[in-house]
Amino acid sequence: MNVANSMSRAGLSLALAALTACSQSPAGKSVVTGGTPLLDAFLTAYGKPAPYTTLDDSGDQVTYSPQALEDVAPGVVALISKGEIPNGCRACGGALSINYLKHDASGYSRLGSWPEIGGKGEFGKALPWTTRTDIDNGPTLVTTRLEKESGCSAAFQELITLTPQKPVKIATVVVATAYAPAAGEQAGPHVTGQVVPIERGRRFAVKLSGSNSVRQVFIRKGDVFTTQDPGATGC
């Protein structure tokens, strides 16, 4: 860890819990409430009604369920689904899949599919996620992954923008890191923070505070956002 080795384990636990809670219900979206458009879109994308269970290449049973629909262009929607493995091993994580569908008066038709594009979790689960519209030019999915190792905890966010043509993973950022205190210390190095928009579609920052204050700026380079500023590195 470089400049951002910062925040007590107790404080980070609260911060990570808050990040997870904020990510469990996609903002402004109907999450599997039985809405006809959502289920119709899923049926078109997968050819089966929701939830749909199948075997993956490893022989694990995966259940796919629709999560939300996002408008990405006139007459085009993105169907966000999750695939999860009941009782999956730690390495057998679930993930989010995205399908682009044309939508008109006749219904839905398939345009493209991006299976397991992001949000890979552990023990068969997909990561919690939400949607933001203030970072990039299209809706941006934000997944949150919590990582714990001996003496260290961290939180990562993966940003996936739904462009009119396809989903694009624009960045992965560290929004919290904390180390256990050394002998005789009350708190170890720790930071926690969030993604803050600067100029939509061109720049955003990760602002962190705790043992240190850090502002890590990400700038668009082609389809993705990159940085040369130091920030939290995770465990």
Image (spheres, rainbow, N blue to C red):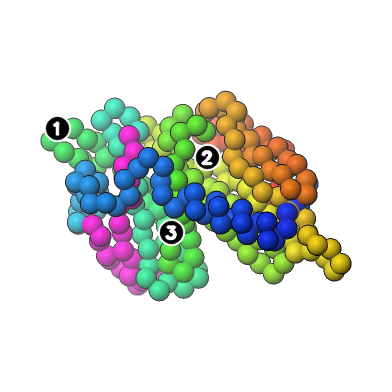
Q: Which residue is mark 3?
A: 126
Q: Earlier in the sequence, mark 2 or mark 1?
A: 1
Name the side, left or right, on which 156 lies relative to 189: left
Asked if one can make out residue 11 in the rendered structure from this viewpoint, the answer is yes
Q: Residues within 10 Å of mark 2 (few under 14, many from 20)?
A: some
Q: Could you tell me residue 173's position as x and y percent?
A: 60, 46
Looking at the rendered structure, the kind of residue marked 3 is: Ala
Looking at the rendered structure, the kind of residue marked 2 is: Ile
- Residue at 41% x, 49% y is 25
Looking at the rendered structure, the kind of residue marked 1 is: Ala
Of circles 2 and 1, which is in front?
1
Q: Which residue is mark 1?
A: 105
Name the side, left or right, on which 79 lies relative to 207: left
Magenta span contains residue 65: yes
Outermost residue toward the right in this view: 184
Q: Which residues are magenta?
A: 50-71
Q: Which residue is mark 2?
A: 170
What is the secondary structure assignment of the residue under circle 1? loop
Q: Could you tell me residue 170's position as x and y percent?
A: 52, 40
